[in-house]
Image (cartoon, rainbow, N blue to C red):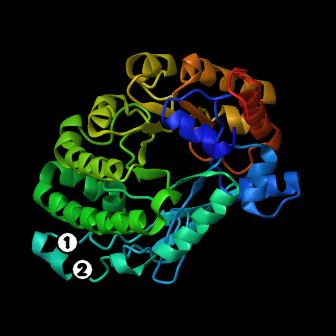
Amino acid sequence: MTPKERINAILNRRPVDRLPVDLWCTPEVLDSLRAYTSQQDEFAVYHALGLDKIVWIFPGYGGRYFDPNDSGEITMWGVPTRMVKAGAATYQEYINPPLAGYEQVEQLETYPSWPDPDCFDYAGARALADEARAWNFATVGPWISHFEIYCQMRGLENALMDTIANPEFLDAALDRIDAIQTQMLERMFTELGDRLDIVFISDDMGMQENLLISLESWEQHFKPRLKKWCDLIHRYGKKVLYHTDGASFPIIPGLIDCGVDVLNPIQHVCKGMDREQLKRLFGKDILFHGGVENQQVLPRGTAQDVVDETRRCLETLGGNGEGYICCSCHNVQAGTPVENILAMIETVKAYGKNPAVHE
């Protein structure tokens, strides 16, 4: 099977020759894999490693390519950023949230930096998706969010407080954030057609031990909007991959109710995110992507530690040889040994091959 065939088979719960293995990584890690494979082209690196890469399709905006890891000074939402060094890695931080000083719903009317859906580079996204298809890779994009964007624009402390003390302002801002991205998303579907396989919705709701906000707040402010997006995405024949870090167990039934197809990243070291339990309770209703622990095992463990961790993910999240795309639990971080990344990839490729499914 090709990587795209393998991913699409998993998404549609059809037999596969083996479970797929994807990779998320920081730019520093990608550079280390370029050196290892002697390939400069990003897609050539994934091909050389034998990955079932799901390629990110981010449309540019206003003449600038947009990526959540972008180093630009101002985001499309008008949020200033800065790049900070942390050991071997460089990360983007959002600073000076432009809506922090707003107090009234009416002020949202005068905010000068709401994105224009016509300014996204749909042609560029289509070209990138065509390139991914030429390599037989599946695609995911663009990147849409409710709460994460609100937090960037409002500031995290204000955003959390608004769920309790200022829900009218929260809902008004979320309506604008939703409407802009919905228009962009519909244009993406029209422009890209079957070039796009999966839509990526990212709204981190979990910490290490609990949710960031109450379950009641999530159900009131975010669940109905998520449901509308899932319904729209499904009408166009696409799958929904929903990203939330941390201890997100309480909202998983609600995600299933909304129509989420794939849950990422399965941070199983967090409270309530036991892999075996997740598979037993929700495995018939939702697929899993991620799982391989990247706070300790991938960056600091031995290659054998990674083999053991990967096999455990395959045996639990991938039980019965279905419903799971193995991947690092979020981005593989800078400084992670290449041999550990290879250990994850090769463990998946060697595990549970199905001789009944042929190339």
Image position of 24 (left or right of 261): right
- Looking at the rendered image, the quarter that the C terminus falls into is top right
Measured as percent of width and height from the top left, residue 272 is found at 41, 23
Image position of 226 with respect to 96: above or below: above
Image position of 234 with respect to 311: above or below: below
Say what amino acid the circle numbered 1 marks. Answer: Tyr
Q: Callout 1: helix, strand or loop?
A: loop
Measured as percent of width and height from the top left, residue 169 is found at 14, 62
Residue at the image point whose x is 35% and y is 61% from the top:
149
Image position of 295 with respect to 127: above or below: above
Which residue is denoted by mark 1 in the rendering?
A: 102
**Is residue 219 something that shows in the picture?**
yes
Measured as percent of width and height from the top left, residue 270 is found at 47, 29
**Is residue 266 something that shows in the picture?**
no
Image position of 86 (left or right of 339): left
Alpha carbons under labels 2 and 1: distance apart: 10 Å
Say what amino acid the circle numbered 2 marks. Answer: Tyr
Residue at the image point whose x is 48% and y is 35% from the top:
12
Residue at the image point whose x is 36% and y is 53% from the top:
236
Image position of 164 (left or right of 93): left
Q: Residues within 10 Å of mark 1 (few under 14, many from 20)?
A: few
Q: Which mark is residue 281?
A: none
Which of these two is toward me, 88 or 238?
Answer: 238
Q: Residues within 10 Å of mark 2 (few under 14, many from 20)?
A: few
Measured as percent of width and height from the top left, residue 200 is found at 44, 52
N-term mark: 2 or 1:
1
Mark 2 vs mark 1, foreground winner is 2
Image position of 156 (left or right of 13): left
Which of these two is toward me, 84 or 42?
Answer: 42
Which residue is denoted by mark 2 in the rendering?
A: 111
Image position of 11 with respect to 96: above or below: above
Q: Are marks 2 and 1 in contact (CB under 8 Å)?
A: yes
